[in-house]
Amino acid sequence: MELKEFIENFVALFDETDASEIQANTAFKELDEWSSLIALGVIAMADEEYDVTLKGDDIRNSNTVEDLFNLIKSKK
Amino acid sequence: MAFFEFKNVRIAGIAAGVPKQVFSNLHPHETDSISSEYSPEDFVKVTGVEERRVSDTLTTSDLCYEAAERLIADLGWEKSEIEALIFVSQTADYWLPATSCILQDRLGLSKECYASDCSLGCSGWVYGLSQVASLLATGEIKKALLLVGDAKKRIQGTHDPLFGHAGTATAVEFKDGAEGFQFHFGTDGSGFDAIIVPDGGSRNQVSPASFELEEVEGKMVNRLQTRMKGMDVFSFGITTAPKSVKKLGEHYGFDYQQADYFVFHQANMKMNNMIVKKLKLDTEKVPSCMYHFGNTSSASIPLTIVSELKGKFEDKPTKFVCCGFGVGLSWGTVAFETENIHISDLVEVAEH
């Protein structure tokens, strides 16, 4: 599992946010477009692309995109 | 492993009752609790719920009663022959007595009637079906009613735009030689607070503090209203429902893909689409009614059959796989075949 590919999958969950605004160190919950609906998209993406089950606390306890990447990697 | 089957029982018919009143999610009603986090359009796009039926007067048992009267009339059943009634709901008429007792009398059923309530939500129709099937399996009781749904809440307040009101009736009968039902069930009470009304039961009795509003996942709710850990419920649904369907097929040695229809609890579109994708199902075989009715809790499986499949399958042998999952956490999957089943027209109930 690669960070670059994960960021691409993460970016794809957003409609209005430009890809350049989302980097490994982006605090994703501070993005204007972030919402609980996109959080569901993250859970779905983790399940679909990486076969990893994320819970609400996993999202709540992650700050940056790389945090999420590392968490999913550790659960694989 | 909670697998079992009951033979010699069949579904004779299904009916569903909903309030006449339609609430649109694109134009939220003043009593709808809308999150400020996203627009009505985004809510509809993600959840798939554009409108739902809502009533502040009709209880679940009112809707079930209307559905049951229609179904009994359509089937030509004698009320005196109905010797069992199970009511599945989390919105009972009273704390006590059981609503099933009230419905026995209101429907004019015999006093020689087994009546019991079952408190389950989204998995409730499948659980209720297993209970009714077990009562009928010996052949001593020949006809039973399963009345299932959720509607008007126990306390006044706002409406959640994800949920609609519905009460359904499923007529189940003993029939020698019928193939019956195959079930798989599961429970994970560690997730008991994923969907919960915290106060009002004996664990946390009603007190003045129960009425104080607090923010939960972007919405202001009090402790007598339902609160949900949306993300946890979502990850539960997309993992548990597909597994349960696969397990049932493996246990009973059938290819689940061969079923004619898959009817899932209508949680929300995002969750249901994931489940369908994970099971690699042909979407033509997976009817959905959440666009018009929202998430109707335990009523969602029979309501989907009534609203989406009426006229498409009744007279020919049709294999169903149905899966309910949610509050508890609780889940159940059933496989059965129907033939010459009666599906009543949707019963739209006017305000009292």
Image (cartoon, rainbow, N blue to C red):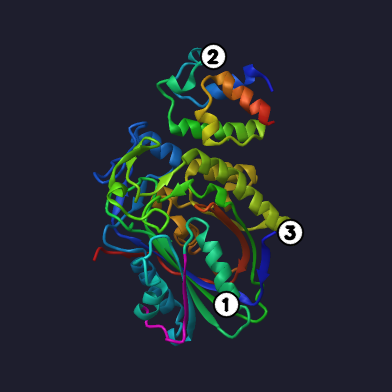
Label located before the other in sequence (1 or 3): 1
Residue in front for this viewpoint, A57 or B65: A57
Q: Which residue is mark 1?
A: B135
Q: Which residue is mark 3?
A: B251
Q: CA distance from mark 1 to mark 3?
A: 23 Å
Residue type pointed to by label 1: Leu
Q: Which residue is mark 2?
A: A25
Q: Which picture quadrant has residue B44?
A: top left
Residue type pointed to by label 2: Asn
Tell me if I can see residue B227 in this picture: yes
Q: CA distance from mark 2 to mark 1?
A: 60 Å
Of tags 1 and 3, the one toward the viewer is: 1
Q: At x 27% / y 64%, what residue is drawn?
A: B350
| Above or below for B333 versus A55 | below
Residue range in magenta is: B107-118
Give the class, few, some or many, for how many residues have Cα within 10 Å of label 2's Cα (few <14, many ≥20). few
> Seen in the image, is A71 located left or right of residue B105?
right
Q: Chain of mark 2?
A: A
SS at badge 3 = helix
Tell me if I can see residue B340 in this picture: no
